């Protein structure tokens, strides 16, 4: 070990660094995750990577900064632009995460065709050979003259190439394969990923080019250790959906240039990812008819209302404690709703196994979905199908009351646009909706769960 090296113990899960080894990481509490790493002092102090950027930063007056400088590149996919907040911002560092096979490489290669009309793109792959990329590009019909492919994992060589060829956009597939030779740890370890990301951050800010990094997720669904990369980059996008079904949802988890609530919906087919412009139609397509335990709710995803089918099932418990399970909905919130149903509305689930499934892989984290969850469970409990042309939204309070929700007007308009005939809304939202005759849909205001269920059967 050279004089200028030091040994640190780094947690592979959260990136916590310590001078001594701990069996349990003091930061994230996981066991046996701390590994010894020898780090060159130069790198620890940022000297090695700083030689990329030797210019001294000059302070400027706030009033002299021109925000018109924020140039955005459109990707040719409206759904993707929406998640970015209107296109990729010049000079931003973007992390696109998701499980293997979800379509990260496909999406990025696909947008190269449109972006390549105006920009020179450098696509660096540490995972696939040039031939493999070419075969995929042929399938996706990406055929841009401006797209350069490089297969390399040494981050210093990549930095040299970027500095000399000065492309307009860089894609790194993936950050876990990148390797800084000065570090002793393996590619994909926290120290490597952090160091390489820092180098790309410097490059993107210095040359004012967007750099898109692909990141794989670890077993808990976090990108290379939860918060390690997220605070370095400007934008974190996350691909959801399972690789078995063809639908993919791209969600902004962090966005310094736009809202984090927006989602983009795609469908994977044999020529890549296709945009789904009307997700509600897609989510409602396979709805069963004439059966109990299904109900349509409405959630806001950013600025867009999305209608989704919620299925509830209540069956008598065979033995032991009743089971509760929720897919796409918070387990604790389900327990809360069941407690309210029992205590305040007189529907008894204490000897029932209860299941909730939100169809299409959408995750409901908005309280406005409460009423639809409750209605689907009551419908299953009573085995009474509810009105198929009806939509329900409202938050349930602990006193059993139905509380107002934001954006009621947008939700009602979307329901009416998709051909629903009745909309059950919280009573106190009626005032905000104004003249009800303008909506071309029957609107019923309710202030209790029982009232909502009775209006639907
Ligand atoms: P890929 O983009 O390689 O995933 P990631 O980079 O996130 O690991 O996606 C690979 C999957 O997508 C693979 O299962 C095949 C499928 N696919 C299609 O269905 N159609 C296509 O046109 C392409 C290119 C891939
Ligand atoms: Mg890939």
Image (spheres, rainbow, N blue to C red):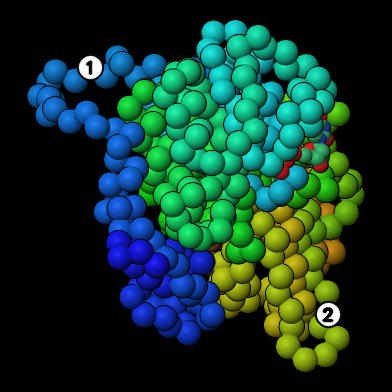
Measure how far apart labels 1 and 2 are at the Cα level. 65 Å
Residue 287 sits in which quadrant?
top right
Percent across and percent down for residue 296 are 71, 46
Residue 308 horizontal side relative to residue 395, left or right: right
Residue 390 visible somewhere in the drawing: no
Give 53 or 293, whichever is nearer the viewer: 53
Mark closer to the chain start, 1 or 2: 1
Quarter of the rendered structure image containing ligand 1 = top right
Quadrant the N terminus occupies? bottom left
Residue 290 visible somewhere in the drawing: yes
Percent across and percent down for residue 299 are 58, 44
Numbered disc 2: secondary structure: strand
Asked if residue 409 is positioned above or below residue 193 in the image, the reply reads above
Give 296 or 82, whichever is nearer the viewer: 82
Tell me the residue at 83%/90% (across/down).
319
Percent across and percent down for residue 223 are 55, 53
Asked if residue 385 is positioned above or below residue 233 in the image, the reply reads below
Give 246 or 271, whichever is nearer the viewer: 271
Residue corresponding to mark 1: 66
How many other residues sit within 10 Å of disc 2, few (<14), some (14-19) or many (≥20)? some
Residue corresponding to mark 2: 316
Residue 383 is marked as: none
């Amino acid at each position: 070990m050279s004089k200028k090296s030091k040994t640190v113990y780094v947690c592979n899960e959260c990136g916590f660094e310590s001078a001594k080894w701990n069996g349990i990481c003091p930061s994230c509490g996981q066991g046996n995750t701390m590994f010894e790493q020898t780090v060159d002092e130069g790198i620890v102090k940022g000297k090695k990577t700083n030689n990329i950027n030797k210019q001294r930063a000059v302070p400027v007056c706030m009033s002299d900064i021109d925000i018109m400088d924020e140039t955005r590149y459109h990707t040719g996919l409206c759904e993707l632009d929406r998640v970015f907040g209107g296109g990729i911002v010049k000079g931003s560092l973007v992390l696109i995460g998701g499980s293997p096979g979800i379509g990260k490489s496909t999406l990025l290669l696909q947008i190269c065709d449109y972006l390549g009309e105006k920009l020179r793109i450098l696509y660096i792959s540490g995972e696939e050979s040039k031939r493999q990329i070419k075969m995929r590009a042929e399938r996706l019909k990406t055929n841009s003259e401006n797209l350069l492919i490089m297969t390399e994992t040494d981050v210093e060589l990549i930095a040299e190439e970027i500095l000399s060829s000065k492309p307009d956009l860089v894609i790194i597939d993936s950050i876990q394969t990148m390797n800084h030779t000065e570090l002793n740890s393996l590619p994909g370890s926290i120290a490597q990923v952090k160091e390489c990301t820092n180098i790309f951050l410097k490059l993107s800010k210095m040359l004012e080019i967007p750099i898109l990094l692909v990141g794989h997720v670890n077993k808990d669904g976090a990108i290379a250790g939860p918060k390690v990369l997220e605070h370095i980059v400007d934008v974190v996008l996350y691909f959801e959906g399972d690789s078995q079904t063809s639908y993919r949802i791209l969600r902004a988890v962090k966005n310094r240039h736009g809202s984090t609530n927006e989602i983009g919906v795609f469908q994977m087919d044999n020529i890549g990812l296709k945009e789904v412009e009307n997700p509600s139609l897609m989510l409602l397509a396979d709805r069963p008819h004439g059966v109990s335990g299904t109900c349509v709710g409405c959630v806001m995803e950013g600025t867009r209302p999305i209608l989704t089918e919620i299925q509830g099932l209540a069956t008598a418990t065979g033995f032991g404690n009743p089971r509760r399970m929720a897919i796409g909905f918070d387990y604790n919130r389900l327990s809360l709703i069941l407690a309210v149903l029992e205590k305040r509305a007189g529907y008894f689930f204490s000897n029932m196994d209860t299941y909730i499934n939100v169809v299409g892989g959408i995750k409901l984290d908005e309280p406005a979905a409460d009423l639809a969850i409750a209605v689907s469970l009551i419908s299953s409990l009573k085995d009474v199908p509810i009105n198929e042309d009806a939509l329900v939204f409202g938050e349930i309070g602990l006193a059993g009351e139905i509380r107002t929700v934001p954006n009621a007007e947008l939700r009602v308009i979307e329901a009416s646009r998709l051909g629903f005939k009745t909309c059950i809304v919280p009573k106190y939202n009626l005032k905000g909706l104004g003249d009800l005759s303008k909506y071309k849909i029957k609107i019923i205001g309710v202030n209790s769960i029982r009232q909502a269920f009775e209006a639907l059967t």
